[in-house]
Structures are given as structure tokens and as C-alpha cells.
Amino acid sequence: MMTTPMTSQPEAALQLMEAVLRDGRPMAAEYAQIFGPGATGHVETIEEDGELVSTCAWIRRDLLVGGLQLPVAFVGSVATQVSHRGRGHGTAVVERAIARAAEDGAALALLWADESEWYQSRGWVPMGTENVFVINSNNAFLLPDAVGVRPMEARDVPAVHGLYCTHESRVDRSEAETGALLTTPGLRALVREVEGEVTGYACVGRGEDLAHCVHEWGGTADDVLPVITSHWTATSEETDRLFVMVPESEANFTAYFTFIRSLGAKGILSMARIGDLGALARVFDQLTPEGVTVEIVGDRSLSLDGPSGQITLTDHEILLALCPPRGDKRVTEVAESEIGVDLPLLPIEPYAWGLDSI
Ligand SMILES: CC(C)(COP(=O)(O)OP(=O)(O)OC[C@H]1O[C@@H](n2cnc3c(N)ncnc32)[C@H](O)[C@@H]1OP(=O)(O)O)[C@@H](O)C(=O)NCCC(=O)NCCS
């Protein structure tokens, strides 16, 4: 089998993604960051006998977690032509995306998978935390009235971006990027305005994904919950449940939804693979106290050297120490006892809001 890397075929790649992932329906407008004018994302492709047979998209992003900047890449839209499946192309195209992202400084590659099994058997592991709450007719009457809520307009983008930037855990994006993402087809965006000022916003839907799901919002609970009420009113005409995504860092919201007895589940944020080990070592350097030395060992491990010992973390152990699924601290605790020092900054709880997903 001959495979030839080709990176200059975004249109053919888009056609393949549309055929495989959308039954031929258009998807470029959903992913302006990959296919739009001035896009910063990339597509990788694999060709067999002159024909493009497999593709995926990726984009370099920085996750901001408190004061930390975590360089990552999001990978998505993996697709192989039906007639060419089972020959390793899908695996190869994703490996290429990870390698390119690592060259571009990404410490981790992240992806959102409907079916994670294929990725799990290729070294991807669950990472981070995302809470999901359910609004339905049993609890919706407890939500505040939708006072001051109206559809978002283009003039609201600076205020909405400002509210987005108040989140402790988020993807680093510019106001222009927020503005472009807010034009994604299928997005319903509402704001709350109080005395001429936009004080809250919330978004439902994104292309063909995240229907009936509040996936991005900003503002205090007093300003966001009325917007969610309004989304529920519209949603309840179509279906009986509205989902609300809440990161761990937004404890007020988690407490509120728990208080109104919304059904909740603590899920994972994404699937992850290690990218550039050097970038990852620099992240660990920032997250460990003085007196702890972080070193790269071989091409898959990091060693942490502390006052009373040393521990070597390999592959997914590194991820379990950095951002384990559902905040599980066990690997961090083992590291602390081995090296003899507290690691209060570990693990971290990064988050990507819905508009950033690819
Ligand atoms: C998933 C997909 C990209 C794999 O492409 P591919 O070129 O066949 O990938 P590979 O040849 O590297 O791997 C194929 C293997 O994965 C298995 N596989 C395919 N889909 C799977 C799934 N959903 N869960 C578990 N295993 C799966 C195949 O049975 C095959 O197993 P085998 O090697 O034992 O025969 C392709 O099936 C596809 O385009 N599916 C539809 C789109 C999709 O689901 N994309 C991923 C979400 S972003």
C-alpha cells in the first residue's frame, strides 16, 4: 500500500468529510476556523492511488486555566471513504495530525468523540471534567423569569466576548474569533440586557451538534439563569429536555442546579493524547514548586525529582497527574508521596466552551 501525504487539498478533504459525516450536507460554515477566510486550522489528508481516502482537521489553541497557558490542539472530523476503511488510513491521518500539532508546540491533542472506543484503542484517554445538568418540566418552574432577555445581535459581540473572558477556564480567543464563532449556523444566542448593558449570554446548538444543549454562557448566575429560562421556553416546544454544560470552575452554577434538583452527571471533558513532551515538561515546571525538577526521559516519560525521591510518569500517567478524568487526584497523591512535597497546583481543570469544539 502506498500512502502519500498531501496537505493542500482542503476542498477535497471538506467534500470527503461532508460525504462521510453529513451525508453530503455542507459543513464548512460550521467550522469557519478550519474552512473560513483567514482560518488558522488545518486539514491532513491521505491519498491512495491518486485518490483522497482519509482526512481529519486540527487547530492549535491555548487553554487558559487560571494563570496557566496550556498549549493544545483540537482534532476532529476524522473520516475515511467507506470503500477504503480498515486499511489503517484513519489511524495514520490522526497520527499525522498529532505529529504536526506537536511540531506546532501542542503539549496535548484533544478530541470529542461520539464513540470513543476507536480512539481508546489508539492510545487516547479520557481527560478532565464536564458537568451536565438537565432542565425539564420538573424543575424549569424554579428558574427565574426571563427578564431582559433578547436575541443576541452583532453589536453585542464586544460585551459577550468580555463576559466570555471572565471565565477562569477557557480557550484563549480574540474578540474577532468570538464574533466569527457566534455566526455559526444552527446557533441560538440570547443575551440579558440590564439598563442598556449586556450582563449575560447563553448559546444553544452549533451546526448539527449540541442541539438542545446550552454549551456556552457567560455572566453571573443572576444574569445567565434568566437566559437559560428563555432557551428552555423555546426548547420545550421541540423536546422535553434542555442540557446545560457547566465546568468544574463554576461552582455557583453547579450548586444552583443541584439545589433545584436538576439531574446532573459528572462526565469527561474530552479524549487526549500527548503531543510535544517538551511543551508538557514546561507546563509541569510551572505547576510544581521550587525544589522539584522536571525532566524528559526518553520520548514518552517525564521524571519529577523532589526533596525525598523521584517518580517517572509515562504516557497516560502524565495525563492522569495533569488533568485526570473527573478530578481524580490519585496519581497526583502518589507523586506527592514519592517525591516528598505537596503539589497544590495539580491536577488542573481546563475547559473548552462549546463554540470552540471542532
Ligand atoms: C472511524 C474511521 C475514521 C476509521 O477509519 P479507517 O481508515 O477504517 O481506520 P483504520 O483502518 O485505522 O481502523 C479501522 C479499524 O477500526 C474499527 N472501527 C471502525 N469504527 C469503529 C468504531 N466506531 N468503534 C470501534 N472500532 C471501530 C474497524 O472495525 C477496524 O478494525 P480492524 O482494524 O480490526 O479491522 C471510519 O470508520 C469513518 O470514517 N467512520 C465514520 C466517521 C467517524 O465515525 N469519524 C470519527 C468521529 S470524528
Image: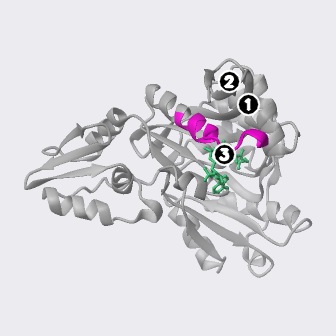
Q: Can residue 168 be seen here?
A: no
- Asked if marks 1 and 2 touch (Cβ < 8 Å), the reply is yes
Relative to 51, does residue 231 appear above or below in the rendering? Answer: below
Taking the image as shown, residue 203 lies to the left or right of residue 235, namely left
Kindly state the secondary structure of the residue where label 1 is placed: helix
Display coloring: one colour
Read off the residue under disc 2: 39
Q: Indicate yes or no: mark 3 CB to ligand 1 under 8 Å.
A: yes
Whole-Å distance between the Cαs marked 3 and 1?
Answer: 30 Å
Which residue is at the far right? 237
Taking the image as shown, residue 5 lies to the left or right of residue 243, namely left
Report the disc number at residue 100: none
What is the x, y in percent for residue 142? 73, 77
Residue span colored magenta:
81-95
Report the disc number at residue 86: 3
Which residue is at the far top? 8
Read off the residue under disc 1: 32
Which residue is at the far front? 1
Whole-Å distance between the Cαs marked 2 and 3?
Answer: 31 Å
What is the x, y in percent for residue 44? 63, 28
Q: Is residue 88 magenta?
A: yes
Say few, some or many: other residues with alpha carbon within 10 Å of mark 3 (under 14 / 14 to 19 / 20 or more).
few
Kindly state the secondary structure of the residue where label 3 is placed: loop
What is the x, y in percent for residue 215? 68, 54
- Asked if marks 2 and 3 touch (Cβ < 8 Å), the reply is no
Identified by mark 1, the residue type is Ala
Say which label, 2 or 3, has the lower sequence index: 2
Identified by mark 3, the residue type is Gly
Residue 214 lies in what quarter of the image? bottom right
Whole-Å distance between the Cαs marked 1 and 2?
Answer: 6 Å
